[in-house]
Image (cartoon, helix red, strand yellow):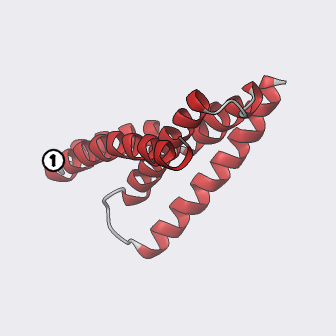
């Protein structure tokens, strides 16, 4: 049953990732990978919020957690893509863009996890 939950969540997360990235690319015509950064930040925010809820609210069953945490958000966030895009920026000697991408993605991701945690705590505690 967990495999089915992961697969269903993964399918939905991948579709959401594709849709959001396509939308960003339509409106942002630059070499900087903004779509990936936004997806990673949103995924971190959601994961932070869910982590607090999983820890403090008992109504989330084990399969709901597997569906959301591993399936949906695991396929929605694009950290492997982040690594490749950062590498390609460095390979093309776009050092400043690579540094900005790495620092902002990591820092925004950590801040979004904390914000999601605190938001859930203030809303549901």
- Residue 76, given in percent of the width and then of the height, sits at 57, 45
Where, quadrant-wise, is the N terminus in this rendering? top right
- 52 left or right of 90? right
Seen from the viewer's position, the closer of residues 117 and 122 is: 122
Q: Is residue 54 above or below residue 90?
A: above
Residue that appears at 58% across and 40% down: 73
List the residue tagged with mark 1: 95
Residue that appears at 66% across and 38% down: 68
- Residue 29, given in percent of the width and then of the height, sits at 37, 72
- Residue 27, given in percent of the width and then of the height, sits at 44, 75
Q: Residues within 10 Å of mark 1 (few under 14, many from 20)?
A: some
Residue that appears at 32% across and 67% down: 30
Seen from the viewer's position, the closer of residues 46 and 27 is: 46
| Residue 93 in view here | no
Residue that appears at 72% across and 40% down: 9
The secondary structure type at the circle numbered 1 is helix
């Amino acid at each position: 049953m967990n495999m089915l939950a992961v697969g269903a969540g993964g399918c939905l997360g991948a579709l959401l990732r594709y849709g959001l990235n396509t939308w960003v690319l339509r409106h942002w015509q630059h070499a900087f990978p903004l779509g990936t950064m936004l997806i990673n930040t949103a995924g971190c925010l959601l994961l932070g919020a869910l982590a607090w809820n999983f820890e403090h609210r008992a109504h989330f069953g084990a399969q709901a957690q597997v569906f959301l945490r591993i399936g949906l958000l695991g396929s929605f966030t694009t950290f492997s893509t982040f690594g490749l895009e950062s590498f390609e920026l460095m390979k093309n000697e776009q050092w400043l863009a690579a540094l900005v991408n790495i620092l902002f993605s990591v820092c925004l991701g950590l801040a979004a996890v904390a914000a999601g945690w605190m938001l859930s705590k203030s809303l549901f505690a």
